Amino acid sequence: MSFEEKLQGIVRHHRDLASSLAAGGLGAQDYVRLSKEYADLTPIVESIETLRKRSEELAGLEALIGDPASDAEMKTLAEEEYRALKGSLPQLERQVQRMLLPKDVADEKSAILEIRAGTGGEEAALFAAALFRMYERYADIHRWKVEILALSDTGLGGFKEVIASINGRGVFARLKFESGVHRVQRVPATEASGRIHTSAATVAVLPEAEEVDIAIDDKDLRIDVFRSSGPGGQSVNTTDSAVRVTHLPSGIVVQQQDEKSQHKNKAKALKILRARLYEAERTKLEAERAAQRKSQVGTGDRSERIRTYNYPQGRVTDHRINLTLYELERVLSGEALDKIIDALIAEDEAARLADLP
């Protein structure tokens, strides 16, 4: 099917939906479903009609310019308009193509952010904490709300692990390419010889799932409660408030002890579990789609090295798109992170556009 035939099919389907809705006689569920489909298609159809109108205007100008009987002054004006219109058409076509790309249903969701220190001991934990601050500041810039769900620190300013929810519209769409291994190269404060060390932290960004997205059957869960403990075995509180939730079918285990209330710890654990189950399902579907695609921006695999933060050179390099920015401090403050994220989104979009039939 040609691109033009695809556009004709969309316009025809939009018209059929309008007729069905106007005719009435639909059940409540069908009416809601068709209304949503019609509303989703309307901006695409409007863009298609604008593209067609511009194409017709271009053809009219072309005929006027090629007509020997045309007035010379009129022809000059037509040539100027023709050049401007012809220059704008590719952008209009790309806009229509982008609107035709399959939507990731998770894009509008909030997200669960998980950061874990990798190889490198305390230096890796300090880097994990720096990454979390980067995302905190980035969230603040975008007016998103960050809530820490679980935190294990080293007592020296580093984080062994931190899990947080980031709430806001379109959070997952902006952060989904952050999953993977982030590497840091710098001279630790404790390094007397000034030798550069390399450490790493793993980042996972999961779409926050609602109960309607993932139904968890109580019989599939094993809930264990125990006493919370802090560094050195010191008791955080004297009640059995810590909760360990095991999802038996998948083997996923989530442990939560930050709250003094067993009920709150269980609610937070289930929130993280739901996000991990939802992401597992998304990853499976994405892997099936990716197998049919020629290229993609990263796999979202947490073992994939995606980015290096080099302190001595003040640079950040994203290895998936070979992008290097000499703005390390502005990236870590969240200010310049959009430059990387925008480039990743554009690369993914370009790859998907290239795969459109």
Image (tube, rainbow, N blue to C red):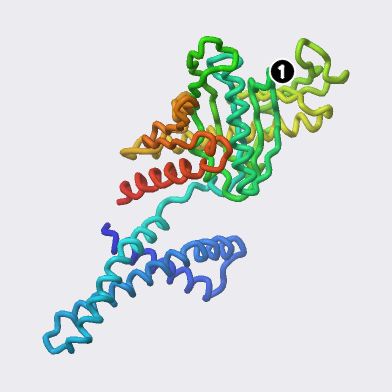
Q: In which quadrant of the rendered image does the N terminus lie?
A: bottom left
Residue at mark 1:
155
Q: Is residue 228 above or below residue 17?
A: above
Nearest the viewer among 141 and 276 is: 141
Q: Position of residue 232 (x, y in %)?
A: 76, 10
Q: Residue furthest right?
A: 238
In this rendering, the answer to whether 171 lies above or below 307 is below
Q: Residues within 10 Å of mark 1 (few under 14, many from 20)?
A: few
For the point 26% across and 59% down, the residue is 2
Q: Residue at point 51% right, 42% down?
A: 336
Could you tell me if residue 89 is visible in this image? yes
Q: Position of residue 176 (x, y in %)?
A: 51, 39
* Residue lying farthest to the left in this orientation: 68
Q: At 34% across and 69% down in the image, what residue appears?
A: 51
| Displayed quadrant of residue 161 | top right
- Judged from the image, the secondary structure of the residue bearing numbered disc 1 is loop
Query: Can the viewer see residue 302 in this picture?
Result: no
Residue at the (58%, 33%) spot, across then down: 277
Residue 35: percent from the left, percent from the top?
A: 55, 65
59 or 132, which lies in front?
A: 132
The amino acid beneath tag 1 is Gly
Residue 309 shown left or right of residue 355 in the figure:
right
Residue 84, by quadrant, is bottom left
101 left or right of 338?
left
Q: Relative to residue 171, is residue 310 depicted above or below?
A: above
Residue 67: percent from left, percent from top: 14, 84
Asked whether 31 or 347 is in front, the reply is: 347
Give the vertical position of 41 relative to 182 (above or below): below
Q: Is residue 70 left or right of residue 138?
A: left
